[in-house]
Amino acid sequence: MDIQLYDNWERSLRTFKPIHTDWVGLYCCGPTVYDYAHIGNLRTYLFEDILRRALELNGYNVRHVVNITDVGHLVSDADDGEDKMEKGARRTGQSAWEIAEKYTVAFKEDIARLHILAPKIWCKATDHIAEQIDFISIIEEKGYTYLTSDGVYFDTSKQDDYGYLARLNREGLEAGKRIEIGEKKNPTDFALWKLSPADSQRQMEWDSPWGRGFPGWHIECSAMSAKYLEPWFDIHCGGEDHIAIHHSNEIAQNQACHGTRLANFWMHGYFLQIDAGKMSKSSGDFLRLQTLIDDGIDPLAYRWLCLSAHYRSQLNFSWESLKASQTGLNRLRETYFGLARGGVINEEFAQRFKTEINLDLNLPKAIAVMWEMLKSAIPESDKRATLDYFDGMLGLNLQSWEPKKAEIPEHIAALVAQRQVARQNKLWAESDRLRDEIKSAGFEVEDTPSGMVIKAN
């Protein structure tokens, strides 16, 4: 069965065909670790997790790479201002190296809580300075760079198709003069290597052929993806905000160095909206996953919320929708827990589910197939086996969930025992009376193939 994926390079659905017969290269832009990830960031990683699971569902061996940006990401995409790591260090009173480690650990904890599969390869920008310098040197040798007082810049005028991914209007940028370009030759030119200020010492800086300094943000992804996935690989992912600058600049670097547009498919997750605007860390006021947990929300309820919308549609966040997702997830868990074991996957529903997944990761329609399956007349044990198959994609970890055992008072336990005896003796009227008495006391009893389950109302 073919997989159809939306490629932002072509702006259309395309049939996925792997470059290699034995593996698929997937590179996902990772976090800049100057602060905690917010839940809008995490929505992008959830989309990428679904993509990886879909590829694996179709039998592909996915070589999944995620970078950690721990240097070089300036507060302005126009290459102005300070490095976000230096800014974060000043905010926290810790060193840039310390906050990089702190927020890297926090990010990995967040994705584990969301049951996002860890990549096969984590790669940090600061561990690959030599590779970035080599990459810049090749670009320089091929005539695509120039030197200013503050660094080495990429000359975008050397490429007629620069910005094609974002369909940039370079002429409009030139005519409008909407940004200060300083010593840049063109508004779209960008830094490959920034020189350290002569009057101060940075916490993160290295020697290079151009002087002591640090790499620009974009060069790390070009260098590390080429190292771990080759200069031409299958799929590059990120948030929609990366299209116009970060990913356009990655492509420019790779075209100059290797003659490729880096990846065969360019895929992007859309923003999480809150209060009519995208969630951002720039204001200093954002929701962390821990914020949801502190409010009594299961992290997988946020995953379930994100699965309810297509990755190429903006998702509106509210506490009401999140709590509704918590209720829906618990309903699904309880349904799963009550199903008999030992069945087989229903091939008809499995095929329909996979068909929706393979049409550009259409999770909302795939989930509709799941609910239809649960309401169908197939054996309960087959429902459980089929739901296990679905959960390989959904990532809700249904098998590990168990209902919380309520504190059962002695008199309620006695009524439950009486009801069990009544049921064994097929005294159905007495069984129903006892169930009603238990309910009036604030508890519910549910009969499942695994036995009676007692829950507080």
Image (cartoon, rainbow, N blue to C red):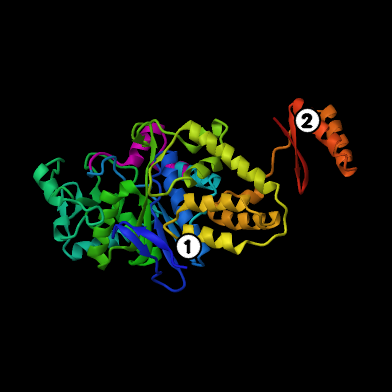
Identify residue for label 2: 436
Give the SS element for disc 2: helix
Which residue sits at x=16%, y=53%?
Answer: 147
Query: Is the magenta region chiefly helix, strand or loop?
Result: helix
Q: List the single residue furthest toward the front.
A: 429
Which residue sits at x=23%, y=50%?
Answer: 191
Q: Quadrant of the C terminus?
A: top right
Q: List the single residue furthest toward the top.
A: 441
* Mark 1 or mark 2, earlier in chain: 1
Q: Does any portion of residue 138 appear in the rendered image?
A: no
Tag 1–tag 2 contact (CB < 8 Å): no
Residue stretch rendered in magenta on the structure: 80-102
Identify residue for label 1: 55
Q: Position of residue 157 (x, y in %)?
A: 14, 57
Q: Position of residue 352 (x, y in %)?
A: 52, 60
**Magenta highlight on residue 384:** no
Which residue sits at x=69%, y=54%?
Answer: 380
Disc 2 residue type (three-letter): Asp
Disc 1 residue type (three-letter): Leu
* Res 226 quadrant in image: bottom left
**Magenta highlight on residue 88:** yes
Q: Position of residue 138 (x, y in %)?
A: 24, 65
Give the SS element for disc 1: helix
